[in-house]
Amino acid sequence: MSREEIFSKVQDIFRDIFDEDDLVIEDTTSSDDLEDWDSLNHINLVSAIEKEFKIRFALGELQSLKDVGAMIDLMVKKLS
Amino acid sequence: MNTYTLSDIKEGLTESFEVTITEDMMEKFLSISADTNPLHVDANYAKERGFKDRVVYGLLTSSFYSTLAGVYLPGKYCILQGADIQFSKPVFIGDTLHVSGKVHYINEAYKQLEIKATITNQDNKKISKATIKTGLLDD
């Protein structure tokens, strides 16, 4: 799966979690950019991504992520 | 009360219990919620609209999803984070409900469980289903 395909699916997950059909995310999007990106929605995002892509994250991996781009890069590595 | 911790829990783990709806429960729910809708408090109104008796509050029956998570699965260390509930059939006073939940998914990094739950009545008809999300507090 290409990085673009992963990004597109992750964007759909963001739209579903945040209930915004026209939400557009970028590599630089972080929790500072989305008001509803609180700790609980963060857990919901991770769970949705794990289920959609059938991957698992360790807490240490997640704590070092600073934005969406870093998350996508980690997913590319896990899915390759 | 069950005391499941993350290491005890595997996907597929199931817990269930039964409860019978009483008039007293309806009165207490009315007192707490102040939901005076006639479908719940006026038997004649309910019968005129095709129900056999006044209808039990959907959120009264759904309160047993709270019990399922907080007492049975995972029990003591539960911290409820969300519940998405869909109703499919009415419940009446005197009905005996079977409340059941199965661990569908475990987010190990953040210690969150996703539980698929159902409530069925004494005729084995599903009256509601729910997806429950709960965290696990440290023991």
Image (cartoon, coloured by chain):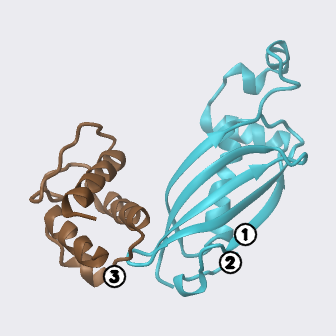
For marks 2 and 1, the one nearer the N-term is: 2
For the residues labelled 3 and 1, the Cα–Cα distance comes to 28 Å
The three-letter amino acid code for the residue at tag 3 is Ala
For the residues labelled 2 and 3, the Cα–Cα distance comes to 27 Å
Residue under the image location 29 percent in, 37 percent down:
A21
Reading the image, the residue beneath label 3 is A58
Q: Reply above or below: B43 against B71.
A: above
Chain to which mark 2 belongs: B
Q: Colour of chain B?
A: cyan
For the view shown, which residue lies furthest in the top direction? B48
Residue under the image location 67 percent in, 22 percent down:
B37
Residue A67 rendering spot, x and y as whole percentages? 15, 65
The three-letter amino acid code for the residue at tag 1 is Glu
Residue B15 is marked as 1
Q: Colour of chain A?
A: brown
Chain to which mark 3 belongs: A
